[in-house]
Image (spheres, rainbow, N blue to C red):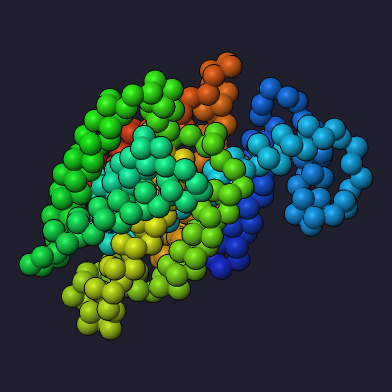
């Protein structure tokens, strides 16, 4: 199937804008629903009064709610909701980048090993007793970006090969996964092991405004950089030789993709653990609805990724009474069948060597 003629690719300019407005409305609606979920019942109107007061740092609305309600809404539930949106958007963006770079619809950071390296770095800091806001993210980012450069260096020593890239990524991912398991097994504190194991399967429960702000800045900067290069991403899909002929600096573009992907993936893994399949599922949904042009695909996927994560987080918090299921479990249950469908639908793939 030709990507360029699939789905609703012929959406007009105004229809696309309308679609984006619908997604934004849906995002706001699901955010409200997500904040409502919990042991303490809340009023949707009260939620937005609190949020608006906090955003503008003034009492626009008279406080007719208790102090503990404000704490629950603003300090506990809202950071989780915003982090879910950021994580979904970031993973979707990285999925687009990896698939464009490798010209393979089955590529994402988890296949190329970036997340496994980041996970090992974060867990190493946790087990060694690292403290402070930046220690876990820095540990994750350091090993994440080291992993990405190992993968790309090995796959492009003679000539760049997407097949070698994926195979190298799988090998390095397996190595770091084994190392992570060893670190967890050798950990001495039982509570520490339990928290790490839960973190490894993904959770938004530890979100706070400090981690949200850092991840948000990383997403905004990355999105602006990548969106400004949407034409280059379209051209590189035709092949490296054609792209170079048309004036695209392929080596520079690859480097930017590696750095941006490593940055986003590492911060996500450091703050929420491993949440799989988002970067695989969302870009494909996007191509089926708005087409393969990155100018539209990037905007759609960022919004859709946030919506997808909010939905899966709501499921994770409600599927078992009185117990939260790691969000990575839910995304895997949804994403794994989709992944198998993609493998079976072999004609839906990019070119590559």
**Quadrant the C terminus occupies:** bottom left
Locate residue 56 relative to residue 269 in the image: left or right: right
Q: Residue furthest top?
A: 321
Q: Residue 240 in the image: x percent, y percent?
A: 21, 71
Residue at 53 percent across and 24 percent down: it is: 324
Look at the picture and state if 207 lies above or below 4. above
Can residue 301 be seen at all in this image of the molecule? yes
Counting every numbered tag in the picture gives 0
Q: Residue 267 in the image: x percent, y percent?
A: 43, 50
Locate residue 172 relative to residue 313 in the image: left or right: left
Can residue 352 be seen at all in this image of the molecule? no
Q: Residue 313 in the image: x percent, y percent?
A: 53, 34
In the foreground, 289 or 70: 70
Residue at 36 percent across and 34 percent down: it is: 127
Q: Residue 187 in the image: x percent, y percent?
A: 32, 27
Q: Which residue lies furthest to the left in this view?
A: 158
Look at the picture and state if 136 lies above or below 229. above
Locate residue 11 relative to residue 238 in the image: left or right: right
Residue at 88 percent across and 53 percent down: it is: 60
Residue at 51 percent across and 53 percent down: it is: 215
In the foreground, 225 or 140: 140
């Amino acid at each position: 199937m030709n990507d360029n003629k699939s789905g609703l690719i012929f959406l007009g300019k105004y229809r696309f804008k309308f679609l984006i407005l619908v997604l934004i409305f849906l995002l706001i609606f699901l955010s409200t629903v997500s904040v409502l979920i919990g042991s303490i019942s809340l009023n949707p109107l009260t939620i937005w009064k609190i949020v608006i007061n906090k955003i503008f740092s003034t009492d626009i609305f008279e406080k007719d709610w208790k102090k503990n309600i404000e704490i629950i809404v603003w300090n506990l539930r809202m950071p989780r909701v915003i982090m879910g949106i950021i994580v979904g958007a970031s993973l979707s963006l990285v999925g687009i980048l990896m698939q464009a770079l490798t010209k393979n619809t089955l590529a994402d950071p988890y296949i190329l090993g970036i997340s496994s390296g980041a996970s090992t770095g974060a867990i190493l800091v946790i087990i060694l007793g690292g403290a402070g806001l930046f220690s876990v993210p820095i540990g994750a980012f350091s090993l994440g970006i080291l992993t990405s450069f190992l993968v790309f260096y090995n796959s492009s020593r003679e000539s760049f090969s997407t097949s070698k890239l994926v195979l190298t990524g799988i090998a390095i991912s397996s190595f770091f996964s084994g190392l992570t398991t060893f670190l967890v097994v050798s950990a001495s504190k039982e509570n520490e092991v339990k928290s790490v194991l839960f973190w490894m399967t993904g959770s938004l429960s530890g979100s706070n405004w400090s981690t949200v702000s850092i991840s948000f800045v990383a997403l905004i900067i990355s999105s602006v950089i990548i969106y400004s290069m949407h034409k280059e991403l379209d051209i590189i899909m035709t092949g490296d030789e054609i792209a170079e002929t048309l004036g695209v600096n392929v080596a520079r573009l690859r480097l930017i993709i590696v750095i941006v992907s490593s940055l986003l993936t590492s911060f996500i893994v450091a703050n929420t653990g491993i949440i799989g399949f988002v970067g695989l599922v969302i870009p494909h949904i996007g191509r089926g609805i708005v087409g393969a042009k990155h100018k539209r695909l990037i905007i759609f996927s960022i919004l859709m990724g946030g919506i997808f994560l909010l939905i899966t987080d709501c499921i994770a918090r409600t599927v078992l009474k009185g117990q939260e299921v790691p969000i990575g479990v839910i995304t895997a249950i949804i994403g794994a069948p989709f992944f198998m469908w993609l493998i079976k639908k072999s004609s839906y793939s990019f070119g590559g060597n």
